[in-house]
Amino acid sequence: MKHLNFLALLSTLTLLFPLFALARDKNQHSVNIPGTVRVGRTQLKAGSYKIKWEETGPTIQVRFLKDGKTLATAPATLQTNDKQVTQNDVVVDKTSANTNALKEIDLSHQKEALVFAQGGM
């Protein structure tokens, strides 16, 4: 009897584990920033970053992490589009100070995008 209970519990956990993994990754994404870009008041160098947010939208606070440390935080709008608007993962705008400011992050060409107001300020 104990063996059957253990087997039933193990089977249930095996079936639920993928659901927990999907739920955990919903509000985070990896992004490669190809060049130096301004996010809020912070300059981020080119490289791979993990972005995370806690809210469900549409207005959210996005954290940029590298090696587990938060390097920048900026407000954004989580938008759902009916069709893909950009071919790039990261969209930047040139500012009047001739720097690149983060405008948008396309979430792996899905139908969602993080849009940063005026370069994430």
Image (cartoon, rainbow, N blue to C red):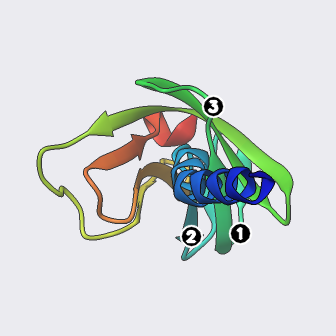
Tell me the mark number nearer the camera, choosing from 2 and 1.
2
Instruction: Where is residue 19? Give x, y as percent.
Output: 51, 50
Residue behind mark 1: 45
Mark sitting on residue 33 = 2
Please identify the quarter of the rendering in which residue 11 is found: bottom right
Is residue 45 rendered to the left or right of residue 95? right
Classify mark 3: helix, strand or loop: loop
Instruction: Report x, y in % for residue 118.
Output: 46, 36
Residue at 40% from the left image edge and 40% from the top image edge: 115
For the residues labelled 3 and 2, say whether their Cβ atoms are less than 8 Å apart. no
Residue 103 placement (x, y as % from top left) = 43, 48
Q: Secondary structure at mark 1?
A: loop
Residue found 40% across the figure and 24% down from its top: 58
Q: Amino acid at mark 1?
A: Lys
Q: Residue tagged by mark 3?
A: 54
Secondary element under disc 2, as helix, strand or loop, is strand
Structural distance between the alpha carbons of marks 3 and 1: 24 Å
How far separated are the C-alphas under marks 3 and 2? 22 Å
Along the horizontal axis of the image, is 71 left or right of 55? Answer: right
- Residue 36 at what x, y percent from top left? 63, 68
Confirm whether residue 15 shows in the render. Answer: yes
